[in-house]
Image (tube, rainbow, N blue to C red):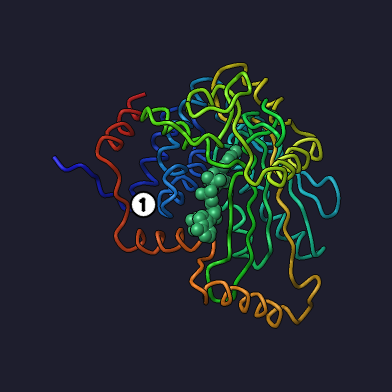
Amino acid sequence: MTDTVDLTLEEADALARDVLEAWGLAPDHAAAVAATMVAGERDGCTSHGLYRLLVAAASVEKGVVTPDAVPEVSEPAPALVRVDGKGGFAQLPFARGVPLLVEKARAKGVAAMALNNVVHFAALWPEVEALAREGLVALAFTANHAWVAPAGGTRPVFGTNPIAFAWPRPGREPFVFDFATTVIARGDIELHRRAGKPVPADWGYDAEGRETTDAKAVLDGAMRTFGGHKGSALAAMVELIAGPLIGDMTSAQSLASDAGRGGSPLGGELLIAIDPAGFLGDRVEEYLAHGETMFAAIEGQGARLPGARRIAARRETMERGLRIPAAFHAELLDLLQK
Ligand code: NDP
């Protein structure tokens, strides 16, 4: 028996949808969630790839997510879109709201969309990338569970609070970055715990607020933001604009609402879409070219652009398909037996 299993993207998508439906997700939710997981696997972001099927199944089992929620789209103001996810996963509400967000951004120059009451476990780059493909500049923010201490403190206040940005590039893949505001992903600390390996002392604190190299102690204590007070301020910004600003929960409230079930975070997400034509009119091409000059100056000195690794992985996968560990594939097939 080989150690790996090869799947086409279509086979992976069908498997993911079957698993999600077997766990009770409505077909439209299953399709939207499966698409982002397959995209993650395709782009070499395995921590947000098919592995998340296990996380999504657990969230359904723990009753953290409403598996058949019907998202409700509304327009609170001329340049605003709101999608109430009604406790379902975020992917379908995003898909339902995007056409209106794009339409408003083009009509007004800038528009924002709030996803409320959604369970968000996923990477943000697929969302901003989709908007950049429409020729828009995009930003996305979401709060999380309160696992992260502010700079100068040692007790959790923030979530891991990711920020994503996308910029359209004529004839090329959009420029995209997407990262948490923590020094390291929580999943990496979890991997250290499982492997029984110590973590660097600057990753977090134990529950008593002491520096520690014990991964479990950090998971039970508090993670640190990246960049000291700068990352801490960005994490605070995400809390505010993806929580109170849009009438949704902070990370502390999300963790409290989980009530120890260990489910994915429930709360809000804010997306902002800007149409370059709003400022530039018919000079969009000219000014996007200035952006290209900057990208060339970065790459010209051997530095890489954020997103470059992902796009390279995507190209490779599109050619040869997906390869996943056989044991993991067996785990996914087991999930079908629900
Ligand atoms: P990373 O620290 O791995 O940073 C990822 C970003 O930085 C990517 O855009 C990546 O590009 C870029 N990058 C990495 N290395 C370099 C380099 N050497 N030069 C230039 N760019 C580089 O991300 P995180 O671990 O913080 O986050 C991972 C994912 O987790 C994100 O997608 C985030 O949205 C998600 N997340 C989701 C949460 C939620 O609540 N939904 C909570 C927290 C995180 P590339 O991809 O090409 O490597």
Q: Is residue 190 above or below residue 273?
A: above
Q: Is residue 147 above or below residue 115?
A: above
Which residue is at a point 72% across and 58% down the rendered structure image?
273
Q: Is residue 86 above or below residue 36?
A: above
Which residue is at a point 56% across and 30% down the rendered structure image?
264
- Is residue 138 shown left or right of residue 200? right
Task: State the residue position of label 1.
Answer: 10
User: Mark 1: few, some, or many residues within 10 Å (few <14, many ≥20)?
Assistant: few
Q: Is the shortest distance between ligand 1 and the CB of mark 1 under 8 Å?
A: no
Q: Nearer the viewer, residue 233 or 102?
A: 233
Which residue is at a point 52% across and 77% down the rendered structure image?
300
The extreme right residue here reads 77
Which residue is at a point 72% across and 54% down the rendered structure image?
100
Residue 60 percent across, percent down from the top left: 51, 25
Residue 171 percent across, percent down from the top left: 54, 76
For label 1, the SS is helix
- Is residue 279 shown left or right of residue 62? right
Residue 246 percent across, percent down from the top left: 79, 39
- Is residue 188 shown left or right of residue 207? left
Q: Quadrant of residue 104?
A: bottom right
Q: Quadrant of the N terminus?
A: top left
Q: Nearer the viewer, residue 78 or 267?
A: 267
Residue 174 percent across, percent down from the top left: 57, 66
Q: Quadrant of residue 314?
A: bottom left
Q: Quadrant of the C terminus?
A: top left
Q: Nearer the viewer, residue 255 or 56?
A: 255
The extreme left residue here reads 1
Q: Quadrant of residue 101?
A: bottom right
Residue 123 visible in this rendered orientation of the protein: no
Look at label 1 and name its amino acid.
Answer: Glu
Residue 320 visible in this rendered orientation of the protein: yes
